[in-house]
Image (cartoon, rainbow, N blue to C red):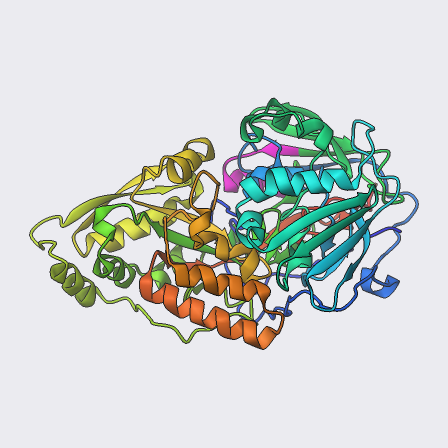
Amino acid sequence: MRHRWIVAAYLAVGLVATACGDDAESGSTADEEATVAETTAPADDTTEPDDETEQEEEPADDVSGGTMVVAISEDPGHFNPGITTGFNVHVVTGSMFNGLVELDDNANPLPDLAESWEVSDDATTYTFTLADGVTWHDGEPFTSADVKFTFEEVLLNFHSRTKSGLEGALASIDAPDDQTVVFTFSEPYAALLQRLNSTEAPILAQHIYGGVDDVQEAAENLTPVGTGPFMFESHEIDSEVRLVRNPNYFKDGLPLLDEVVYRVIPDANTQLLALEQGEIDYLWRVPGAELERLGGDDAIDLYPVNSGPGGGFCVPTLTFNLDREVFDDIRVRQAIAHAIDRQQLVDQAIFGQGRAATGPISSEMAFAYTDDVTEYPRDIERANALLDDAGFSAEGTRFTIDLLHFPNFSKYGEIIRENLSEVGIDVELAPLDRAAFLPRVFEQRDFDTNVISYCNNSDPSIGVSRMYLSTNIGNIPFSNGAGYVNPTIDELFADGNRTADTGARADIYAEIQQILVDELPYWWLVETRFTVGATAGMEGLAPHSGHFAEGAHFVDG
């Protein structure tokens, strides 16, 4: 059965997008009018959706073929989506790999590598029946052994969100036959179906990675073999990645395009000019300042979305390295929170189209969010008093800290440096590309502060907990960068995992938010959303999904 989403273009009113996607490199805004469906996984039996749920639309017979050119801001570096949550990797690999399920734009699960599933009444056992006739790009058959291997040997070790969410809760993964996979949990687990798509749980080939000593450094990461709609063709570093149509894709009639080419264009303005001039067909991040102008351009369609490759519901966040002596004192962290002007970040970093964050959970995750937490309003007098009390002299510079950030987060860094200078804190900005940033932060822990866009995704157990669990400190990209340890928080997140009732889970996450906002291992800056731009000659796009190009096609030749 074919599964495809046709997304109608609509204007972005009151939205902005620069970057989102875990753990993207620049911020974007949240639509304050948006509503978010509760995304607790169903506890009853769930099977393949009916045709109405699929929202399937047949393209005309003459729309297949052609090449779609997609702008990306940096080279992916590698093509293994199982070892990172980074947007730069998933934006490309989402077209080459599949998960057991795919999610629609309300985080409802739809079949992907699994054609159907059953959930036990107590939500402790999930049984998946895999699709027939699926092969890897090299012709080898896909089986349940690949799923078991991927989780046990890769995702539970190196994917920060999967590791933090399932480690300790997942009792076993069994593959009783080639077409069946059974996940068994020691206690009820509410959100499994929302974490099995190509972003959260991309399935890798056991015959490719089974004999690899170090999956993070494997040569195989540069020559990807997936099951997805497009196959790897070539990679010119810092120039382009070329994918070609998978002629043996297991979804009938898909994909429709011949090629998808990812062109590396670092500058956002150059990307936009390329879209307007027809040199590219798809732009993930339309600069927020340009949305009003582009809304009147009939040649470009705008797609406001809150998720995509790498994640969604993202919150650019200032990380405190709690191993640093200066941050041992809660008064220092509180002072910095009071000193940073988040409204200035909203106005100048994300063009007035977003909102200040109130804590670790995005307000767009409606069922889990609360704003009933301790507040730290902009208050320079209070910040100075806290620093005085902490013993840092107001004579000259109180102390100096570094702030690591991706290059596209430079505006955040400039504003934070300006704000903290008002209270005598000197900030040395250190823009780093991904290859330098990730080991320095998560392996060497050689930093004072940094800014990262951490994406919540559709449930706190998926995108939130990984930042705070004590078991998630280490050389895992976009994990617990603060080095925060609190056994109560560890246990509360475990309670959230095992609780099925949405109201009870909301109470747990409210308590978590209050504790974290009181202890301030991080300072949450703004909530973000982003807008995709595409040539009006394209249909069948799914911007919310890693499989955004699976059903894409040109309608004008």
Q: Nearer the viewer, residue 335 or 512?
A: 512
Q: Please identify the residue farthest to the left as the structure is shown.
A: 395
- Indicate whether 209 appears above or below 453: above
User: Is 270 in the magenta?
Assistant: yes
Q: Position of residue 418 (x, y in %)?
A: 26, 51
Is residue 209 visible to the viewer in this orientation of the structure?
Answer: yes
Report the number of numbered marks. 0
Q: What secondary structure prevails in the magenta region?
A: helix
Residue 274 visible, this angle: no
The residue range painted magenta reads 262-276
Q: Residue furthest right?
A: 61
Membership of 16 in magenta stretch: no
Which is more toward the observer, 356 or 2? Answer: 2
* Residue 433, image x, y percentages: 44, 34
Q: On the rendered structure, is 401 left or right of 238? A: left
Along the horizontal axis of the image, is 73 left or right of 253? Answer: left
x then y, percent, for residue 440: 38, 35
Look at the picture and state if 525 lies above or below 201.
Answer: below
Task: Determine the residue positioned at 48% across, 40% down.
Answer: 476
Residue pictured at 62% horizontal, 62% vertical: 187
Q: Which quadrant would residue 556 be assigned to in this image?
A: top right
* Quadrant of the image occupied by residue 229: top right
Quarter of the C terminus within the rendering: top right
**In this picture, residue 272 sits left or right of residue 107:** left
Horizontal and vertical percent for residue 422?
Answer: 19, 56
